Image (spheres, rainbow, N blue to C red):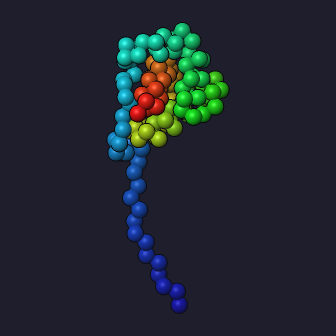
Amino acid sequence: MSQPVTCQPVATVSPLTQSSEGSWSSGRYDCCSDCPMCCVGLLCPAILACYVSRKYGEHCCLGLVPGGMTALRTHMRLSYGIPGNVLRDAMSMCLCGLCELCRMGREVHARSLT
């Protein structure tokens, strides 16, 4: 005869209730905290997108692919333990793309210095 299998319940964490292990090092509109990076982002966002992708460890052309920066923001947020969800990532990149790109640039720069 076979024995009944009992399992411990597994705790699940939804994306909305993640522990806030980390947070963004700067706000979305903190352009004055790194003016040169924000100037590059506003004047030529393709260059900053390639820089962010490369600095984060991805291929530099990821920043030029449609949806690439949204995917990179999601991956960056998850790997740094920043709470949020994919919908917020997509909406942030659609509505405030240049500001988010500058914030991602500041984030990879700040985290590579530590």
User: Is 3 placed above or below 106 here?
Assistant: below
User: Is 48 placed above or below 6 here?
Assistant: above
Residue 56 is situated, as x and y percent measured from the top left of the image, at 54, 32
Residue 19 is situated, as x and y percent measured from the top left of the image, at 34, 45
Number of disc labels: 0
Residue 10 is situated, as x and y percent measured from the top left of the image, at 41, 62
Residue 85 seen from this side: no
Q: Residue at x 54, y 26 (%)?
A: 52
Quadrant in which residue 7 is drawn: bottom left
Residue 2 seen from this side: yes
Residue 86 is situated, as x and y percent measured from the top left of the image, at 49, 36
Q: Residue at x 37, y 28 (%)?
A: 25
- Front residue of this view, candidates 85 and 76: 76
Q: Residue at x 43, y 39 (%)?
A: 80
Q: Residue furthest bottom?
A: 1
- Drawn side of residue 60 relative to residue 43, left or right: right
Q: Quadrant of the C terminus?
A: top left
- Front residue of this view, candidates 11 and 27: 27
Q: Residue at x 42, y 44 (%)?
A: 15
